[in-house]
Amino acid sequence: GAVVSQHPSWVICKSGTSVKIECRSLDFQATTMFWYRQFPKQSLMLMATSNEGSKATYEQGVEKDKFLINHASLTLSTLTVTSAHPEDSSFYICSKLVPTYNEQFFGPGTRLTVL
Amino acid sequence: QKEVEQNSGPLSVPEGAIASLNCTYSDRGSQSFFWYRQYSGKSPELIMSIYSNGDKEDGRFTAQLNKASQYVSLLIRDSQPSDSATYLCAVADWNSGTYKYIFGTGTRLKVLA
């Protein structure tokens, strides 16, 4: 399957700071990437769809001013959690869409802990 | 609201048995279906996609799709303890030109040695 990396794999930060998570497609170009969040023992929750060269499409209830998404190149999308609070602590996972069969391949995830 | 439903489990099967995981979806117009495996603390990995009615086999895995009944299933033959994980069913959704997956909540599978 397609290869997606995320960096960092885990991060601990203080409340009120901002954290940037990178999602890279290592093999094919990725016009469309997705950002998910997963709380313990819960299913994946789609946060937003990231499209190269255009604004991200956010799901209902996701604050676009708090979760900034930038997809400036065909291989990189970033998610910045601004003014993070403990309730933002979660597992953040990106994926990329491979158009051939419209399959999504996930990155390894980033575990964020906000103190 | 489009929905994808799975039994949360856990589904326990003995080693070597066939594990059967089921998923139903609400949108009759859905065309693309996916099964993912997620180990605890890890991200999901794609097992198989299926688009046509019938069976699709890949190694020990068989996906089955019945669009008339709106269900998709995954069979795991010769289950191994390493298959113990949560299995997520996903259905592709096209809405006003945007594309995304709708995920079920997952079925936790335990394969007992």
Image (cartoon, rainbow, N blue to C red):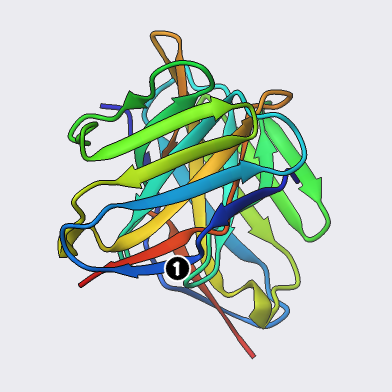
Closest to the observer: B40 or A95? A95
Disc 1 marks a residue whose amino acid type is: Trp
Quarter holding residue B81 = bottom right
Q: Which residue occupies the extreme bottom position in the image? A: B113
Q: Is residue A25 left or right of residue A39?
A: right
Q: Which residue occupies the extreme right position in the image? A: B59
Quarter holding residue A114 = bottom left
Disc tally is 1
Q: Position of residue B43 (x, y in %)?
A: 53, 59
Q: Which residue occupies the extreme top position in the image? A: B96
Residue at (18% x, 51% y) in the render: A83
Q: Quadrant of the C terminus of chain B?
A: bottom right
Residue at (54% x, 21% y) in the render: A52
Q: Callout 1 environment at 10 Å: few (<14), some (14 to 19), or many (20+)?
A: some
Q: Position of residue A7 (x, y in %)?
A: 53, 57
Q: Is residue B53 at all visible to an observer of this figure?
A: yes
Please say if A108 is above or below B32: below
Q: Is residue A6 left or right of residue A15?
A: right
Q: Position of residue B89 (x, y in %)?
A: 50, 46
Closest to the observer: A101 or A71? A71
Residue at (22% x, 68% y) in the render: A14
Q: Secondary structure at mark 1?
A: strand
Q: Position of residue B96 (x, y in %)?
A: 38, 8
Q: Is residue B44 at all visible to an observer of this figure?
A: no
Residue at (62% x, 52% y) in the render: A5
Q: Quadrant of the N terminus of chain B?
A: top left
Please say if B47 is above or below B68: below
Which chain does tag 1 point to?
Answer: A
Quarter holding residue A27 = top right
Mark 1 = which residue?
A10
